[in-house]
Image (cartoon, rainbow, N blue to C red):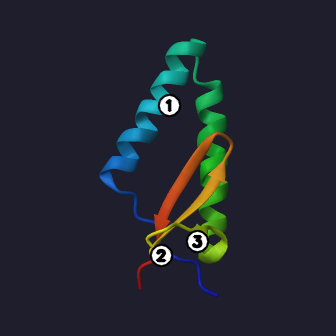
Amino acid sequence: MAKKEIIWSKRAVSELKSILEFYNKRNGNTNYSLTLVNEIEDLLNTLSKSEYIGRLTSNKKTRVIVMKIYLIFYEINS
């Protein structure tokens, strides 16, 4: 199966930015934020190859996958 392109919504980008800023401020450095970004990139790489691994939500269009304490919501479009 071909690797798929992942397009972030504006809301998702904003929320990720807020999360990373929170950890940067709380920890006084970017170490944990960089680790988190690397884990997200790994998950997105997996999703781009196997997009159906997430569980369908109640609307039957959106999928969700758990990453640590975060829920990653996504939709598959052709």
The image shows residue 65 at horizontal and vertical percentages of 62, 59
The image shows residue 33 at horizontal and vertical percentages of 58, 31
Distance CA(mark 1)–CA(mark 3) = 23 Å
Residue for badge 1: 20
Q: Quadrant of the N terminus?
A: bottom right
Residue for badge 3: 48
Q: Is residue 11 left or right of residue 39?
A: left
Residue for badge 2: 60
Q: 1 or 64: nearer the eye? A: 64
Upstream in the sequence, badge 1 or badge 3? 1
Under mark 3, the amino acid is Ser
Q: Residue at the location (60% across, 14% down)? A: 27
Tell whether label 3 touches label 1 (CB within 8 Å). no
Q: Residue at the location (49% across, 68% down)? A: 58
| Relative height, residue 64 to residue 67 (above, below) | below
| Relative height, residue 29 to residue 78 (above, below) | above
Q: Residue at the location (61% across, 34% down)? A: 34
Element class at badge 1: helix
Residue 49 is marked as none
Q: Quadrant of the C terminus?
A: bottom left
Distance CA(mark 2)–CA(mark 3) = 19 Å
Upstream in the sequence, badge 2 or badge 1? 1
- How packed mark 3 is, by other alpha carbons closer than 10 Å (few <14, some 14-19, many 20 or more), is some
Going by the picture, which residue comes out furthest to the left? 10
- How many numbered marks appear? 3
Element class at badge 2: loop
Under mark 2, the amino acid is Lys
- How packed mark 2 is, by other alpha carbons closer than 10 Å (few <14, some 14-19, many 20 or more), is few
